[in-house]
Each structure stands twice: as C-alpha cells, then as structure tokens.
Image: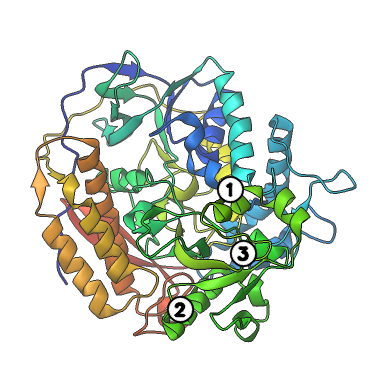
Amino acid sequence: MTQIDLVQRLNSADPGWTINADVIVIGSGIAGLTAALSARDKGLSVLLLTKDVLSTGSTSWAQGGIAAALGPGDSPDQHFQDTLEAGAGLCDQESVRILVQEGPAAVKRLINLGATFDLDSSGNVALTREGGHRRDRIAHAGGDATGAEISRALVAKVLADPKVRIFEHALVLDLLKDKNERVCGVTLHVMGKGKIDGVGAALARAVVLATGGLGAVFQQTTNPLVATGDGVALALRAGATVADLEFVQFHPTVLWSGSDSRGSQPLISEAIRGEGAILRNINGEAFMSSIHPMKDLAPRDVVAHAVHEEIIKSGKPFVYLDGTKLGENIWLQRFPNILSSCRKIGIDPLVDLIPVVPAAHYASGGVVSDMTGKTDIPGLFAVGECANTGVHGANRLASNSLLEGLVVAERVANHLTDLPKQSEPLIENIPTNLIDGKVRKDITETTTTGAGAVRNATGLNKTIDKLSELAKKTTKLSSTQSWEATNLLTVSSFLSNAALRREESRGSHWRSDFPERNDSRWLVRIQGKLNEGKLELSEKTIGKN
C-alpha cells in the first residue's frame, strides 16, 4: 500500500500577538456554543473561535430537527434500540445509553434557554418522524429551520456574556503543547477583521474542538464549504487518535440542480418523507417498498444505497421524491425553505416531482473522545461532528447529531472544574510545509471518484496513489487556501486508507467488491494516529478498552 507523507505542522508566520483565556472553544455550532456556555457555568473565561461568523456554524444548516424521546408512548429505551439498529453493530452502547437518557432533559433546557420549537394543537412540542425512527420523536422549529432557531438562541446567550470573547474569521492552525505533552493553546490566523489579525497564539488551560465535519472533501456536500476537516487534521498532527472516518453518511435526498453542480447542495429534509413523501424511480415506481420493512423511512444508509442503485440501473443522474400529496399547508408551514429552494430552479413540489441524489452529509467518525469530550491527549476535548464518541457507529440515526452535540457539550463541563494552571507552550522545531491550495479541486475529485458513496479496492488504491502524488505538490506560501488543502488531504488520506482496510459493507461504508456485512471479522473500530507524518492504522474490537 502506498504510504502518503502528511504534513506534521502547518507552515505560518510566527505568532505576532498572544491572548489568554481559561478555555478555548473552536467552532460555533450547537456543540461549540453549548460548550462555551457550559464552561461559563463553571466560572471559566472563554475564547470562542469560529472560522466564519458566529451564526454560520453547521448547526444553522440543519433542517429536520433534534431527536429525543419526548412524545407519548416513546421512551429512551426505544430511542436506544433505533440508534443501535441504524449504527449497524458498531455503536458504543454505553455512550448511546447516556445520549438517549439525558437527551429529553437537555432539549427541555434548550427550550428554557430560549429556543422556540413548533407546537402541536395542544401546545406541546410538535414531533415528526425521520428515517430509522419507529416513533415520532423529531422536534423541529420554523418548519424546516430547526438549526437556525437553535443557533439563534445559543448565539444570543453567548453574546450576552461579557466573559466570552469571540473571534470570527479565525482559522485555527495547530495545537500548542507544554513540556508534559498537555495541550495549552493554539496558533490561529484571524482573517483581517478587527484590530488583531494575522497569525497569533491563544493560550488556555483546555481546548475544546467543535469544528464540525469534513464534507468539503467531496465534490458535492450538504455541508458549508468551510467544513474542511480542520479539527480532525490538527488533532492528528498533535498525536490524537482518530477513528471511523470511513463512515461518511451520504444523505439520500439532496436537490439535483444540474450535472455541473459542485460544492454545497440544497438538502431535502428526511422529515418530508416523515410527512408522507415517497421516493420514485424514473418510471414512477415507489421502489423502497421492496427494499426495507420501513419503506421510505428506512435508515439513511439503506435509502441512500437504494437511490444509488436506482441511478445506476436507469442511467439517469437522479431519482424523484414525490411530495405532491402533502398539500399546500404542510409545504408552507413545515418546509418553507425547501419549497423556496425548489422553486428557485423551476420545481414546484406541490405539483412536480423533485429530482434528488445522494451527497456527502455527515461524518460519523472523528477524534476519539468519551461522552464528556475527553480525548487521549491531556487538555484536549472534542464535541459534535468532529468527535467520535461511538454513538453513531457505522451510520448516524437521523437527527441524533444535534442531540449528541448538545448532550456531550453540556457534559464537557465535568472535566473543566479541575483544570491545571496555564502552562507555557513548548515550540517544537518541526520542518513545515503546506499542500498547494491549487490542488484542492484535485483532492475533492480524487476523493469523490474513488472513496465516495460506493467503493472498491481498485478505486481506493488509485485514490491513495493519487493523494500520494498530490502530497508532493507543496508550497512554503502560507494562505487559507493552502492550509485548507493540507487539512483536506490529511482527512482524505485517513478516510481512504480506512475504507480500503474495511473489507465489507456496513452502514454508510459500501464496498462493491465486499457487498456483505461481516460480523465475524469486522466488529472493530478502525483507528489511527500520525507518527512523523506517517499514518498508522489499527483495530479496536467493539466493547473492549
């Protein structure tokens, strides 16, 4: 197997300024904002860093909702079972138990904090259903604008706290460690905003990664384009363990807007199928009825695979989602933003079938952490999509992501009460270089072609060989483009090698050359670290320490 030489530290100018806080939180989605508020509840000062502006974390893009056992007849045990089934044998059961048991109270605290969810005719939180759920347990806001409402409420709370210092347009470069290998801060580049800009150093007693996903490593994604896997890449460079990156969930219903479309794509929420919409092939046949007992509400990996197979069979680049029977009121009240997105390209879902296609949506893998965010590096915590708690296993259950970000970020405060004093960073003399930002397109094309929705050994080996060639296209010129390209190459290399190693199909990892799930061999977590720029993978049996 080709060994790829990966960057050990991002090349940049020396820090021109230094700031201090008790805790640094990187990211402004539900996980980052909640972690910041959790730290403040413990009386700690917080520096909140976000790559764009405060209100544009990945959470604000979430349409469907947040899953919790809030409804009559539902229970955490039922939510537990649905999560395990979706996770295809690789969930950490204790982590899932914590999630589903603490989830309902966490959502109620979110409501008390100011988030306004849609209500039913009795004045209770309105609940709907999504794929993999056997109960209506998806709380939503503004119809299909749940993430935006949650983000609004959390941002307002953070902005009201003078002990939270916020840096927008801040790209974190690398973690800083002290002489005892404890994380004690970060280097970052603030992109020309305010009095502080350029490269600086932020020092703290703990760092919390909440950097979101890595969807931008693919040509089409539902993620914002700033989702370049920065948190996973910098954690790897610092020596942290990363796991499960081969499990990238492709959302089965993304609006197809043309064969040349690239980058962030409009999501067609699974909640539409929860309200009764039906997937149809090019001939108008409702194909999911013959695929799974839950039909159109089967777990996401099952639906995405079925859609992909229909696309291959027909030779057309999409299938259809039929929501014509939902009625005008449901479209206007529950899905106004999706309705608008469709109409912008000339599709009226009230009377037209919607062309849809799978696209990269959610990374179940990330920096290995427990349900309090603790990683294997002292002083470093990871929460939300960039983390790997084992909750999602091989395939995330719909709308469990917001819940995980909320629950784990609240629990991170358990480890922030006994932090050591601020220590001095030890500056390592590591040779540095960067991947030329011009090859970003090559990285995304290579990853999509060989390590996308359906994989095989031939395509994965070609991908790894190509990434090895791209790794040689380096530059000493520091820029946002080269920093992001370096991070993308790092996560793509891990993803592709893990996908090649896992010789089976499970959850959101599909191998055409190994089409069956193989529990006798692959009930393991593929994890890895960087050692002097070389990726070293290993296997951990599920349920063993």
The reply to whether residue 498 is visible in this rendering is: no
Q: Which residue is mark 1?
A: 402
Q: Is residue 115 above or below residue 7?
A: above
Q: What percent of the width, then of the height, locates residue 76? A: 73, 58
Residue drawn at x 34%, y 53% is 241
| Residue 311, numbered circle | 2
Q: Which of the two residues, 272 or 58, is positioned nearer the viewer here?
A: 272
Q: Which one is earlier in the sequence, the residue at label 2 or at label 1?
A: 2
- Could you tell me the amino acid type at mark 3? Thr
Q: What percent of the width, then of the height, locates residue 151? A: 58, 36
Q: CA distance from mark 1 to mark 3?
A: 14 Å
Q: Secondary structure at mark 3?
A: helix
Q: Nearer the viewer, mark 1 or mark 3?
A: 1
Q: Nearer the viewer, mark 3 or mark 2?
A: 2
Q: CA distance from mark 2 to mark 1?
A: 30 Å
Q: What is the total number of numbered labels drawn onto the structure image?
A: 3
Q: Nearer the viewer, mark 2 or mark 1?
A: 2
* Image quadrant assignment for residue 81: bottom right
> Mark 1 near mark 3, Cβ–Cβ under 8 Å?
no
- Could you tell me the amino acid type at mark 2? Ile
Residue drawn at x 62%, y 86% is 290
With 87 as the anchor, is 138 left or right in this view?
right
Q: CA distance from mark 3 to mark 2?
A: 28 Å
Q: Secondary structure at mark 2?
A: helix
Few, some or many residues within 10 Å of mark 1 (<14, 14–19, 20+): many
Q: Residue furthest front?
A: 346
Q: Secondary structure at mark 1?
A: helix
Few, some or many residues within 10 Å of mark 3 (<14, 14–19, 20+): many
Q: Which residue is mark 3?
A: 83
- Could you tell me the amino acid type at mark 1? Leu
Q: Which one is earlier in the sequence, the residue at label 3 or at label 2?
A: 3
Colouring style: rainbow
